[in-house]
Amino acid sequence: MQTQHIPPLQRTPRAWPFKNVYYGWAIVWASTIAAFGMAPVFGPVLGVFFSSIERDLGWDRATIAFAFTTGSMTGSLFQIAIGRLLDKYGARMIVVAAGILITMGMIGLSQMQEPWQFWLAFGVGRGSALAGISVGTGVALSNWFIRKRGRTIAIRGVGQRAGQALMPMMIFAIMAVAGWRTAFLVLAGITAVLIILPAAVYLRRKPEDLGMTLENMTPEELAGIAGGAPRRGLARLSRQVSDVSFTLAEARKTRAFWILLGFVMVERFGLGSINLHMVVNFEDKGLSPLLAASILSIFAVISAVTTMPWGFVLEKVHVRFGAMMMAGLFCASAIVILIADNYPLALLFALLYGLATGAGNIVENMLWADYFGREHLGAIRGFGAPFRLLSPTGPVITGFLFDSTGSYALPFGTFAVIFAVMIFAMYLATPPVKPLAAAPEAPVT
């Protein structure tokens, strides 16, 4: 962490005890804890409940998966509403409100009897996590960091992956003793403590609001990243630190904006489906419920362990090439899960998929921030939300195809092709260059 003298002008919140440490690290702390706390509304954790809900309530997999789809669509709709609010007011109250809604959703899931109750409770909870916490903390971190953006987003990613790694086994133990309804009640308490309190105490909009500068830079350092010529040739492989911001209107005029939007749409289409169906897929192929759940935890551990290295890599390598590497790993993991009918192959899938997801959240957050800057980041991400309504249909389509064919071969094979196309798409997504404002002409004398 960066330690240096803090000028009197800076208004560091009293709850932050490290007065000589850049306050952005408090944002990292609160964001990481919140990311851990939102794990129950992500596919890997919901996947642990699949068999029990299917058995006790008699619902088919498409019905269960529809809750996931509803939640993802709700998240896209919420993003439309909060994008500009994040730019104007910051993430603090948005993350707090999201934590309250997730807690209420977990309580509702513990009492559900009908599919619509499941869809409503999980939908609101997941939508709040995707829009309020994932996007909210992503924008907050991008506002507070630029040179160390990769590692700080990676730290938050470790929190999310740690939640996905630890919670499934905890849930499995609770369900064995007290049932799945009690497990949802326990999760309600966890989310309330881990999301609401840290966000309310620590989150702030941007350093300038507290009389600070970005990463405590000097005026000369700030001026040095306020412009600069784009790199050429092989140098463009490297990340260029630049605090140049595009407005939404300017971003929409670039080719890169639409390629990035398509990239995140199809990535989430496949990723959400695999997350939700992986455990039950391995159970269908003969693994015991415990071994199948262990694959989920192993991939999440690998993802968590490799997230920080990815963060450091993406501070040096341009995020465009990081996205291409990530897509290649997703493609390989989709091919492996197609043929994995034993535990060693399932472990290979966990390794490849864990490496890919370790990069996932870092890549998506850095794509938008590094390509288009931080000043209008909320509005830019909010604009893309309606286009991402296609992404949440992946899990329910996957469930429908399984119910129709008795196999995951068709959807998983399709995902392998999608991930391969993503590699080529990002090759074409060259970063845009914002034209410098023309200097005023000197008056004629």
Image: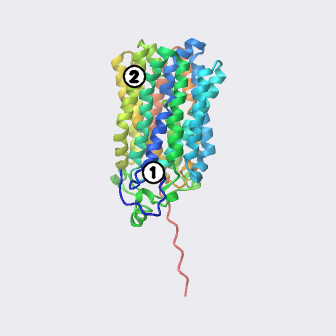
Q: Mark 1, residues whose alpha carbon is within 10 Å: few (<14), some, or many (≥20)?
A: many
Mark 2 sits on what residue? 295
Q: Nearer the viewer, residue 27 or 260?
A: 27
Is residue 323 positioned above or below 273 on the image?
A: below
Element under label 2?
A: helix
Q: Position of residue 238 (x, y in %)?
A: 35, 51
User: Is the image coloured rainbow, by chain, by secondary structure, or in one colour?
Assistant: rainbow
Element under label 1?
A: helix
Residue plotted at (51% across, 47% down): 203
Badge 2 amino acid: Ile
Q: Mark 2, residues whose alpha carbon is within 10 Å: few (<14), some, or many (≥20)?
A: many
Q: Position of residue 344 (x, y in %)?
A: 33, 19
The image quarter in which residue 22 lies: bottom left
Badge 1 amino acid: Asp
Q: Position of residue 326 (x, y in %)?
A: 40, 37
Q: Quadrant of the C terminus?
A: bottom right
Is residue 392 positioned above or below 24 on the image?
A: above
**Mark closer to the chain start, 1 or 2:** 2
Mark 1 sits on what residue? 370
Residue plotted at (47% across, 55% down): 12
